[in-house]
Each structure stands twice: as structure tokens, then as C-alpha cells.
Image (tube, rainbow, N blue to C red):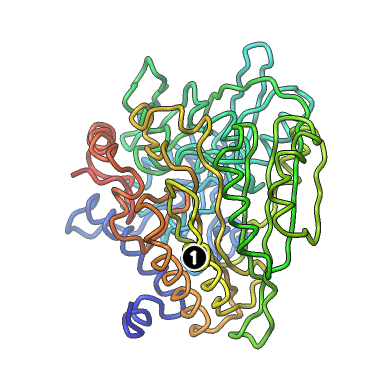
Amino acid sequence: MTPMSRRHVLAGAGKMAIAAGVGSQLGWVASCTGPARRARPDWQALARRLSGQLLRPGEAGFGAASIPYNRRYASIRPEGVALCEGTADVRAAVLWAREAGVPFAVRSGGHSYGGYCASTGLVISLARMSSVTVDTKSLTLTAGPGARNRDLHASLAGTGVATPSGRCPTVAISGLLLGGGFGFSSRHFGLTCDQLLKTEVVTASGDVLAVSPADHPSLFWACQGGGGGNFGINTGYTLRVRPVGNVSVYRVEWEWRHAAAVLSAVLATMTTAPDTLSCRVGADVGGGGPATGGTPQRGVSALGLYFGRSHELADLLAPVTAAAPPARQLIEERSYTGAQSFLAKNVPHGSFTSKSRFLHRALPGQGIETLISWVQRWPGSSNTAGGGATIFAWGGAIGRVAPQATAFVHRGPAFLMDNETTWTARDSASVVSANLDWVDGIYQALAPFGTEQAYQNFIDPALKGWETAYYGANLDRLMQVKRAYDPDDVFRFPQGIPVA
């Protein structure tokens, strides 16, 4: 991208976010209202319909409820936030928004990498719908759409059962599951969407549907990785759980000078590792850097989970720890829920963006050299989360599901690579621009070593050809489901499943 086009897109990052959010929402309003101008929305009418609370600008709690987790999109502020208490509130909010011609977005955890949970009109918040119930007899778990990973883990503590979930504590189950749902237990248990038994969906017309393989099977299929916010609002889930005992965790760190040897050893190990072993290996760089006059702190780390004893884990990791002397190392046994707290590391915060790419095989030597050279070029920012390149081991139970069996098509890759950068509101427009240029650059430089498929939960508003990158051969069927359940394209956003 040329400097001129970058400035046009960026304008301090906030303008791009506003353009994306307002543009999509204005399109929604036009489709609902037509050329006629509607009267000013009656917000009090919405408040009267809700059992929950409607927050307006200036009211206590509005600020915290209106800002998404990804502060890149904090400038997109709504006129109201509906704090829904249950399905009836969700239905009331959708119908009121359609009647009033008010654009809306749905928010469960607020982590959308593309800012698609932000709106200039109404935010339908599912945060209060966060209950979790575990039934060890039927081996099921029921959860509200606002239940976060930390809620799931707390509810599973001491039960002796588990279901695969994400590692970031504040990510909610809706975004996680509807986009696939990958975590440190996925190689062993499968994706979160693979555990779905049934779900409840509020459609654009206000219908409340009980969705399962027997009832509305095409919609059920689409909810297994077809992306959140496309077909309706999911207001509850029932998932499969399975028995689990103590597990082992590890975190190993190396000095940057060992980056090439460590990356090569980790990727080779995970290529043949048992499904019971997971891994995130990162070439990480901390906050600071040339853009802020600081010195970035670079390093390499490997983090993961093993369903087995710690001495077995140490044996599996022996080729990795032998490749270069670790600066720090921890390998120990923990309860399953204790392990989830340990694994909640390297989570982005502040303002961030990323570009993901699936890999069919481990990076070759040239690919590793390219990755290292680009991480060394990270321009820096005031965000302590920094940036870098991360590779997650894929495969195992994920690949034992056929690509067309669920909407989640990415079943064959061996690894998922993510290139990420972060910044804060303190950084200048030029710093933000340099970071966005950097993430574009490393993504393009590594293109020869991977596929054009991308992970839809790391949604990228700048990705070209996103339809096939996210959904591949399943796109046509997803469009059919969209036409069947949202023919008016009410649930619309820039990277939403198209009707046609």
C-alpha cells in the first residue's frame, strides 16, 4: 500500500474505524427505511420494552458499556446500550431497532478484531446473559451468550469435566464458538463449535428458534463456525463436556539470539507430536521501539498444555529445550481449570490488529529467517503488549472433522500463524500508520510459506478476498442459509456473509 493510500485509510486509525462502522450501519438503515426520513427514535419506548437496562450517553455506566475491548474502535460510540437480561430483551431490541430505523450491533465480549461489535446507533449487549450450568450426569454444559472464558472455567472447576474454550479470559462464548473456537485443548478435544448440541437464535423477524441437528439443521450447521452476527442473535448454547483429570502445562523462554533454532525445533516437534500436546510459539517483541525512542525487548517463548504427566511432557519437549538453552522454564502439573489461568498469557490489549494465515506445513528455514527479520523491524509503540509473530499448532482432533461437516472449513492445516501489533491512544497517527504498514509487510513477506486461508475469529477488516479466506468451499452453503434466515440482510457488517 502506498503512503498516500495508507494515510487515506488510516487518518489516525480512528477515522478508518468510524468509516467502517458508520458505512455498514448506514447501509443497514437504508435497507430498512428506504428513502423516506423517519422520525427521531423513541428511546424511551425501547426502555419500556426491556426487563434489563437501557443506557444513554451521560448516564452512569454508559462509558464502560459502550466501549469495545479493542480500543482501536473506541471512537465509534452508540446512542444507546441495551443491557439485555434474556431472550425476550434481545427480541425486543431487534424489533425496536428495525421499527425505528436505528442501526445496531450485537456485543457479547466485545473483542471483535474488526470492530463489528461497535455501532453509532444501538449496541445490543449480551454481557448480563452470562449464566453457566454444568450437568455431570448428562455431560452437558449450558451457557448464556455473554458467558466469558473465565465464567466457563470457574463453573467447570471441581466438576471433573471440561469443554474446549479459548485462552483469553474475557472473550465470550458467542464470538468464540460461532467463529470456530480454538484453544489449547482443541488438538485433543476439537474446536468449541464441534461440541455444540443445540442453540437458541433470535432472527431478524423476531422468531425465537430452537436450533439443533434435528431442528433447523442448516442453521445449526452454519452456527458451527460460520461467524457471529450473520444469521441472527444466539441467546443460549448447550455444549458437550467430557471427563478430564489433572493436566500439565509449560512455558519456556529463550533469548532472541536463539530464535531460529527454537522456532525450527518447536515446529518440527509439533509436526509429529501427539494430539494431547498443544503449543503456541511466539517471536515476541515488547513495547517501546524506534517509534517511541525506546529499546524493544525481543524474545521467543513456547506455551502449552499436555493431557498427561509432567515427566512425559518434559520428554516430549526435550528436542526443544536441547535446541538452545532456555532463559526460563516451567513444566508442572495442575488442575484443568488451574491450567487455563496459567495459559492466559500474551493476550492483546489496548488497540490492536492482526493478520492470520494457515500453514500446511512447518515454516522452512527461509520462512523462519523472513519471520525473524520482520519482527526485528517492528516500529514500536507505547503498548506494553507489543507485537510479533505467533504460530499455533493445529491438527489433531480438529482435522478429524470433515471440512463440510460444519461451517468451519479449516480442518487440514498443520499450523495457524498470526502476525499482530498493538498501540495505544497516546501514540501518534504516524506511529499507528507505521504499525499497520509493518503488519501488512510481514503478512505479505510470509505469504509464500502459507495458504490464503485465514481464521475468521481473527477477523481482518483490510483482508482482500476474505469470503473465501474465511469460508472457502462452504461459502455458497452459508449464503443459502443467510437467504433463508435473514433475506433482508438485517444482520449486515462489512465482512458479513452476503445474501447474494
Question: In this orientation, which residue lies closer to the viewer: 450 or 428?
Answer: 450
Instruction: Work out whether 437 lies above or below 321.
Output: below
Query: Callout 1 environment at 10 Å: few (<14), some (14 to 19), or many (20+)?
Result: many
Q: Is 487 left or right of 101, judged from the image as shown?
A: left
The location of residue 373, given as percent across then percent down, is 53, 73
Residue at figure coordinates x 65%, y 37% from the top left: 277
Instruction: Work out whether 215 lies above or below 500.
Output: above
Q: Image quadrant of residue 289?
A: bottom right
Q: Is 121 left or right of 171, judged from the image as shown?
A: left
The location of residue 95, given as percent across then percent down, is 36, 40
**Which residue is situated farthest in the top direction here?**
137
* Residue at image mark 1: 73
Residue at figure coordinates x 25%, y 46% from the top left: 498
Residue at figure coordinates x 36%, y 32% from the top left: 403
Placement of the C terminus among the 4 image quadrants: top left
Inspect the image, locate mark 1, and give the three-letter code of the amino acid beneath it: Tyr
Q: Image quadrant of residue 240?
A: top right
Q: The residue tagged with tag 1: helix, strand or loop?
A: helix
The location of residue 128, given as percent across then percent down, is 61, 41
Residue at figure coordinates x 66%, y 34% from the top left: 152
